[in-house]
Amino acid sequence: MSGHARFSPSSANRRLNCPPSLVLEEQFAEEESQYAAEGSAGHALAEHLIRKHLKQRSKRPVSDYYSDELLEAVDEYVSYVIGEIEEAKRVCNGPVFTVEQRVDASDYVDECFGTADMVIVTDKVAHIIDLKLGKGVPVFAEENPQLMIYGLGILGMAEMLYDVETVRLTIFQPRLNNSSTWNIAPDTLKAWGEEVLKPRGAMALMGAGDFNAGSWCRFCKARNQCRARAEEFLALAKMEFRQPALLSDDEIAEVLKIADDLAKWASDVYAFAQDQAIIHGKEWNGFKLVEGRSNRKYTSEDEAAEAATTAGYTDIYKRSLVTITEMERLMGKQEFTRILGRLVYKPQGKITLVPYSDKREAINKTTAAAEFQEVSL
């Protein structure tokens, strides 16, 4: 098995909805964004902390990406996983715990394998937990192809030990305050593997089928130049827009369906064109490169502080309280709860209009109206 999966579970949603995208993307070089690199660093730290809890040998990783905000997100995930580990120990005499488990689903699609962040197997449940550190859009466990593929791979191993009754899939997305869990019966999962994954996966490997634009285009390497995606968005752009109040309800609904994707597509095309101009000298008709606005910076903060102090200015530093996670780590959970528990709260999230496909529970309309009026005042 090579180090790179041709049919990666992480891109399964794209492959199943747009099979020929696999072969199309193979024309583009592999590139790791800073967001992906930060995510990898966060996963490495989470792995270390969980292994430490399991009394497994592990060396703490070091990374320039470890900000307070990222460390807090990782801590939330690790706390959740530890809770699931301890619960598994309580309900099962011989639970199995694996961190960053290699998962092979090549029985369904050739060259399909990946890595599950956390796997907990008891005598009845095979639980796959996936950490998402992205801050873009919420991701949900229900019918999630990536986790379903992991589930198929883990099920093949777990059933050699136990008569598994449930495959439990969890996505934990701390930076968006989003987590979801979905249970599926083993037979139902296997049927999906045979009826959906296997035939669509075979099409993807051959580059067969029709191109199909949608939300799954977000991380496609061909997204900036894909004609199918451009045609879909340009069709909407040709709409003769009037003031929103003059559009029909159906017209507004059509715009809302793909407004976010349309904005992201336009942003992607702009970023691609700018990259081509700056790095490769490409000239675009009607556009030019200019130097953007920049903010002033100290050449040396230490020298600036010394000069200001010497001149008699003392109020030149800002102080801020450490994050809640850092404070809890400093005091310990029990002491933190005793000393600061009454002073900590979790504010209500901002109310947002989303499509029905979003898995979050709808809020009461009266509550939404009241909060909107309160914010507007």
Image (tube, helix red, strand yellow):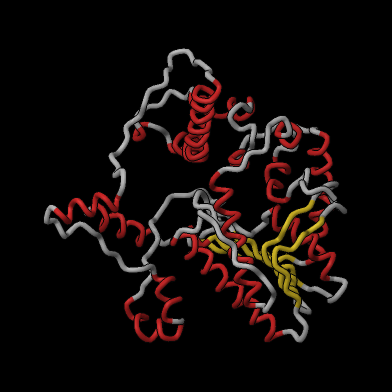
Rendered residue at 75%/56% (across/down): 149
The answer to which image quadrant residue 56 occupies is bottom right
Horizontal arrangement in the rendering, residue 143 relative to residue 285 (left or right): right
Residue 163 in percent (x, y) is at 84, 75
In the depicted structure, whether residue 211 falls above or below residue 179: above
Residue 341 in percent (x, y) is at 37, 81
Residue 97 visible, this angle: yes
Q: Residue furthest left?
A: 312
Residue 115 in percent (x, y) is at 72, 58
Rendered residue at 51%/54% (across/down): 65
Q: Residue furthest top?
A: 285
Rendered residue at 72%/65% (across/down): 184
Horizontal arrangement in the rendering, residue 356 relative to residue 305 (left or right): right
The answer to which image quadrant residue 84 occupies is bottom right
Horizontal arrangement in the rendering, residue 259 relative to residue 9 (left or right): left
Residue 189 visible, this angle: no
Q: Between residues 68 and 316, which one lies in front from this camera angle?
A: 316
Horizontal arrangement in the rendering, residue 43 relative to residue 349 (left or right): right
In the depicted structure, whether residue 122 falls above or below residue 323: below
Q: Between residues 271 and 60, which one lies in front from this camera angle?
A: 60
Q: Between residues 372 and 320, which one lies in front from this camera angle?
A: 320
**Quadrant assignment for the C terminus:** bottom left
In the depicted structure, whether residue 9 falls above or below residue 52: above
The answer to which image quadrant residue 153 occupies is bottom right
Residue 113 in percent (x, y) is at 78, 53
